[in-house]
Image: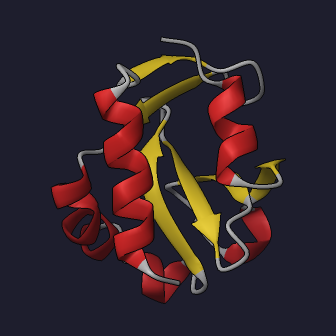
């Protein structure tokens, strides 16, 4: 997965005013990370080790990460007990996910 693509998507969302807000789907709240923080946060959360194949781009402010897989499907998963099989799919792609975000 190309982190640069995800950085560009998040950057465009932030420029449109999406930083955090309600989600029309679980986990019902989102907080986007700044593009320049994505690599650091993914490293700090050890995504490659605990949830290989995923890339985190934000969270819900309550212990769950927002992640995307190689197919760019969007999921959320717990920070504690993080593993690929704990990911819960919430959108088929990033554009669909954006449609669930409120400013």
User: Is 4 placed left or right of 39 in the picture?
Assistant: right
In this picture, is 102 found above or below 93? above
The residue sitting at 65% across, 21% down in the picture is 23
In this rendering, is residue 17 above or below 13? Answer: above
In the rendering, at what x and y percent does residue 32 appear?
Answer: 38, 38
Please name whichever residue, 17 or 34, is drawn nearer the observer in this view of the structure: 17
Q: How many marks?
A: 0
Seen in the image, is 36 located left or right of residue 67? left
Direction from residue 12 to residue 78 in the image, left or right: right
The residue depicted at 75 percent of the width and 29 percent of the height is: 26
Colour option used: secondary structure
Q: In front: 76, or 24? A: 24
Above or below, 40 relative to 77 = below
Q: Which residue is drawn at 34% across and 60% down?
A: 7
In this rendering, the answer to whether 18 lies above or below 69 is: above
Q: Which residue is drawn at 34% across and 67% down?
A: 45
Measured as percent of width and height from the top left, residue 18 is found at 41, 24
Residue 49 placement (x, y as % from top left): 46, 88
């Amino acid at each position: 997965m190309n982190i640069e693509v995800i950085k560009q998507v998040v950057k465009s969302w932030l420029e449109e005013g999406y930083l955090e807000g309600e989600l029309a789907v679980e986990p019902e709240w989102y907080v986007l990370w700044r593009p320049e923080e994505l690599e650091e946060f993914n490293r700090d959360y050890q995504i490659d080790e605990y949830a290989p194949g995923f890339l985190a781009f934000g969270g819900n402010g309550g212990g769950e990460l927002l992640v995307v897989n190689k197919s760019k499907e969007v999921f959320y998963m717990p920070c504690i007990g993080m593993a690929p099989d704990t990911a819960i799919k919430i959108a088929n792609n990033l554009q669909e996910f954006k449609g669930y975000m409120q400013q």
